Image (spheres, helix red, strand yellow):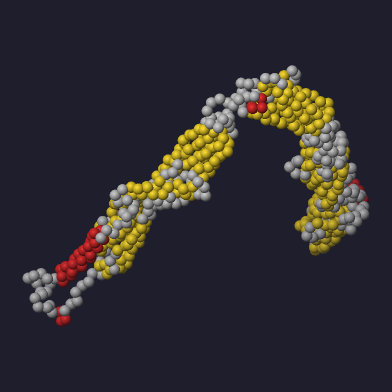
């Protein structure tokens, strides 16, 4: 209808151009004196939207009138067919120029489920200039537009199916892993998106993939989409079925699920479990000096027949088959059936081994002739069974390695000593007794050195242990918990270890070994006292003393006492050197206060302990510093008899000199007190004995 009106207007305009005009030059038919809007074209994005999927409709609008339409309001109505997506169903344009100019406007729409046709309406309201009356007028117009969409949508759901299954390997055995590759098709025209495929082996197959669920972006019609899972048959599977479950989206995000049961292209196994062949028993009989008859019972313990059995013996360089091949072939052994196999064997008498391994390898197939993994066994034949003597030479037993629970053991603690005892010979040893030597603690007295208790005392056991047998070329580990005597000297102790053992003929042997156990002692300094004066005077000496003693069990090396603080001092450090066990000493320094108040300082005792680490003990102290005392002036400013005033000639008895003498006397008395106290302590023997 809109196109027809546009056509009539264009024809009228053409006729007006060719008709003759009157004398005044005016045409017979006048052009429209108001804006005339029409829709020239509609485009859809996406071009083919899915059912209920939002799409953008772009309308190209032209104004065939010479008058401009201004302040244009465009409102869309879905007519019950489409839903407008957005905040409003209208938009504004500043103007749509006249003279056939085109302008575009877009709306986002979505089909309604009850849509019957593809039409929408566009309603325009606008302003324009009336040149005849020189006024501004308003106008409106409504257009019905048919959107370029199909008349109806396919609203069916996706229909996913499996059209092909491929196995790799094509014919897997019952115990072999295989990959099942599924080819999917979608019989519907509706795309399935974001497809999750989950496999269930039911009671027939184990899923040996990383996961039983995999993802596909989409499944569309005739696309031949493939996906694989790695499976393994269960031992007692019922059939070859598996289940596939699909979860997906379609159309505008609708979610759906479906399931399929698939029969994998495998031969149906006979009932019962797989076959399993093993050696039930064997016997070895001597036929002459160098030949032996081996009789084996081979048994099928499985639930199926075993077919195409290949049985092979391998005795290495010690045992070999005489009078035939070491390989036997049997066409079939039924379930639970037993057969006897015989071999004539020769023995290499030059071997020194105590036992002769005889290796067996069995290869076979199941009832469907699917290969079964080969099985291997070893029969241990003792050298004595085939008349071989024991290996020559003296058996050797030694400690190949030992470990301690701690690198350095503190005296008084428990250490675990682990011994690795090795039999290096080619035959076993018996009745092994391992004993640790006893080390005594040395006690140092005033005049002599005597022995105390044992350095290492076994905990919950004696100092020896028993081993019944050590096979040839074998290492056994045995551990002992040892208590280290608290008074043990700090050093590395060499502990003797005695190993007694017997060979196969009950001949006795004895070997001596050594292990090293490092022992350390605790290092500890005790500061007995810090002596400071109760008060000091500015500019006068103050004595600070400290008495200390080594109460540990090791010497303290590089011992030094240092006094630190923000003050002037004498004797700020005292180097002792080596402070032995139980030794005490005394430090004294002098402080010269320079201002009154609380004077704070530290005494630092520094030494090297038995682990070669520097240790510092810090003792803080405080002294209250008083101002220097001055003599009170005499009443009325008079001097006592015999004392002259400042600057007077004679004995020079100024106040400064008098108080200086008093301060010196006080300092001398304090120093004498400390020195006498120190000498008395030394004379009375206040040292700590070791």
Q: Position of residue 649 (x, y in %)?
A: 7, 71
Q: Residue at position x 70%, y 25% from top?
A: 314
Residue nearer the viewer, 145 or 370: 370
Q: Residue furthest left?
A: 650
Q: At 19% across and 74% down in the image, what residue appears?
A: 631
Q: In x, y percent, where is residue 16?
A: 90, 50
Q: Which of 607 and 263 lies nearest the eye of the viewer?
A: 607
512 w.r.t. 536: above or below: above
Residue with the most extreme bottom position: 636
Q: Quadrant of residue 209?
A: top right
Residue 362 higher or lower than 45, as above or below: above
Q: Could you tell whether 236 is left or right of 605 in the image?
A: right
Q: Residue furthest top?
A: 323
Q: Residue at x 79, y 58 (%)?
A: 86
Left or right relative to 181: residue 517: left
Quadrant of the image occupied by residue 184 = top right
């Amino acid at each position: 209808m809109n196109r027809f009106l546009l056509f009539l207007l264009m024809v009228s305009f053409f006729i007006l151009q060719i008709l003759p005009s009157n004398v005044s030059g005016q045409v017979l038919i006048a052009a429209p004196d108001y804006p005339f809007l029409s829709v020239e074209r509609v485009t859809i994005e996406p071009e083919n939207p899915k059912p209920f999927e939002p799409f953008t409709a772009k309308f190209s609008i032209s104004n065939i009138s010479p008058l401009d339409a201004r302040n244009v309001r465009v409102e869309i109505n879905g007519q019950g067919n489409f839903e407008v997506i957005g905040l409003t169903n209208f938009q504004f344009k500043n103007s749509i120029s006249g003279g056939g100019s085109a302008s575009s406007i877009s709306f986002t729409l979505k089909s309604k489920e009850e849509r019957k046709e593809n039409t929408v309406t566009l309603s325009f309201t606008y302003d324009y200039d009336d040149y005849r009356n020189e006024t501004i007028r308003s106008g409106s117009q409504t257009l019905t537009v048919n959107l370029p969409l199909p008349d109806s949508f396919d609203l069916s759901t996706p229909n996913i199916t499996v059209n092909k299954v491929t196995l790799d390997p094509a014919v897997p055995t019952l115990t072999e892993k295989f990959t099942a590759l599924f080819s999917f098709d979608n019989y519907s025209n509706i795309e399935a998106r974001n497809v999750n495929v989950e496999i269930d082996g039911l009671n027939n197959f184990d899923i040996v993939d990383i996961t039983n669920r995999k993802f596909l972006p989409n499944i569309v019609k005739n696309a031949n989409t493939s996906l694989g899972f790695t499976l393994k048959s269960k031992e007692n599977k019922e059939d070859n079925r598996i289940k596939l479950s699909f979860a997906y989206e379609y159309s505008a995000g609708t979610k759906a699920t479906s399931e399929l049961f698939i029969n994998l292209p495998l031969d149906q196994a006979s009932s019962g479990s797989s076959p399993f062949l093993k050696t039930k028993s064997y016997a070895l009989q001597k036929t002459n000096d160098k030949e032996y008859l081996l009789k084996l019972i081979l048994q099928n313990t499985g639930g199926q027949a075993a077919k195409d059995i290949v049985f092979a013996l391998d005795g290495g360089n010690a045992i070999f088959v005489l009078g035939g091949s070491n390989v036997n072939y049997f066409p079939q052994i039924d379930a639970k059936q037993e057969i006897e196999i015989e071999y004539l064997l020769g023995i290499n008498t030059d071997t020194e081994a105590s036992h002769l391994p005889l290796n067996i390898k069995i290869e076979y197939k199941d009832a469907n002739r699917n290969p079964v993994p080969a099985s291997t066994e070893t029969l241990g034949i003792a050298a004595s069974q085939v008349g071989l003597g024991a290996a020559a030479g003296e058996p050797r037993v030694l400690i190949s390695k030992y470990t301690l629970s701690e690198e350095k053991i503190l005296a008084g603690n428990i250490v675990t000593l682990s011994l690795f005892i090795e039999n290096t010979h080619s035959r076993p040893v018996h009745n092994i007794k391992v004993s640790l030597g006893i080390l005594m603690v040395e006690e140092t007295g005033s005049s002599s050195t005597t022995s105390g208790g044992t350095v290492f005392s076994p905990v919950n056991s004696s100092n020896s242990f028993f081993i019944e047998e050590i096979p040839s070329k074998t290492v056994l580990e045995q551990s002992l918990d040892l208590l280290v005597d608290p008074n043990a000297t700090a050093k590395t102790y060499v502990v003797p270890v005695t190993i007694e053992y017997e060979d196969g003929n009950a001949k006795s042997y004895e070997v001596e070994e050594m292990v090293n156990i490092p022992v350390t002692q605790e290092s500890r300094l005790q500061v007995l006292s810090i002596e400071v004066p109760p008060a000091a005077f500015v500019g006068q000496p103050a004595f600070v003393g400290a008495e200390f003693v080594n109460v540990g069990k090791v010497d303290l090396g590089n011992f030094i006492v240092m006094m630190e603080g923000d003050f002037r001092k004498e004797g700020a450090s005292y180097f002792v050197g080596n402070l032995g066990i139980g030794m005490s000493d005394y430090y004294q320094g002098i402080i010269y206060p320079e201002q009154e108040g609380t004077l704070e300082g530290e005494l630092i005792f520094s030494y090297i302990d038995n682990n070669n680490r520097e240790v510092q003990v810090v003792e803080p102290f405080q002294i209250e510093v008083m101002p220097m005392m001055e003599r009170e002036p005499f009443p009325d400013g008079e001097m006592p008899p015999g004392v002259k005033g400042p600057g007077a000639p004679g004995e020079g008895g100024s106040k400064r000199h008098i108080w200086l003498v008093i301060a010196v006397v006080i300092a001398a008395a304090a120093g004498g007190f400390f020195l006498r106290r120190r000498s008395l302590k030394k004379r009375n023997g206040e040292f700590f004995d070791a």
